[in-house]
Amino acid sequence: MVAIRLTRAGTKHRPYYRIVAIEKEKPRESRYIDLIGHYNPMSNPAEVKIDLNKYNEWINKGAKPSQTVKSLIKKVSADN
């Protein structure tokens, strides 16, 4: 089963997250299937960029987004 979730990047005390499609059983920093966007909580305001076409494509294929990704999608949709 494929999940859409965050994977951590960046340095110590400076987190940066990628929004990825990944097999649900894989660890957080393992190889992902597709990069969908990124999220930078350290900038003010927090920067969120998501390719909604890729996101919708994965949802149509049966991928399940995490709670955090769902909230980020709502934020991006409200901004547009």
Image (spheres, helix red, strand yellow):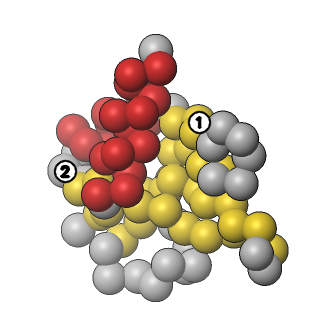
Instruction: Give the camera-side residue of 56 and 18.
Output: 18
Q: Which residue is painted at 29% across and 57% down in the image? A: 67
Q: Is mark 1 on a helix, strand or loop?
A: strand
Q: Residue 49 carries which label?
A: 1
Q: Residue at x 55, y 79 (%)?
A: 30
Q: Image height check: is 58 above or below 10?
A: above
- Of mark 1 and mark 2, the one earlier in the sequence is 1
Q: Up-down: is 29 above or below 61?
A: below
Q: Which of 75 and 62 is in front in this view?
A: 75
Q: Is residue 39 above or below residue 27?
A: above
Q: Closest to the observer: 14 or 61?
A: 14
Estimate the spatial distance between the alpha carbons at disc 1 and disc 2, rounded to whole Å. 22 Å
* Image coordinates for residue 3, horizontal then vertical, percent: 31, 62
**Vertical comparison of 29 with 51: above or below:** below
Describe the element under mark 2 as helix, strand or loop: loop
Q: Can you name the residue that lies furthest to the right here? A: 11
Q: Residues within 10 Å of mark 1 (few under 14, many from 20)?
A: some
Q: Which residue lies furthest to the front in this view?
A: 44
Q: Is residue 41 left or right of residue 36?
A: right
Residue type pointed to by label 2: Gly
Residue 63 relative to residue 28: left or right: left
Residue indicated by mark 2 = 62
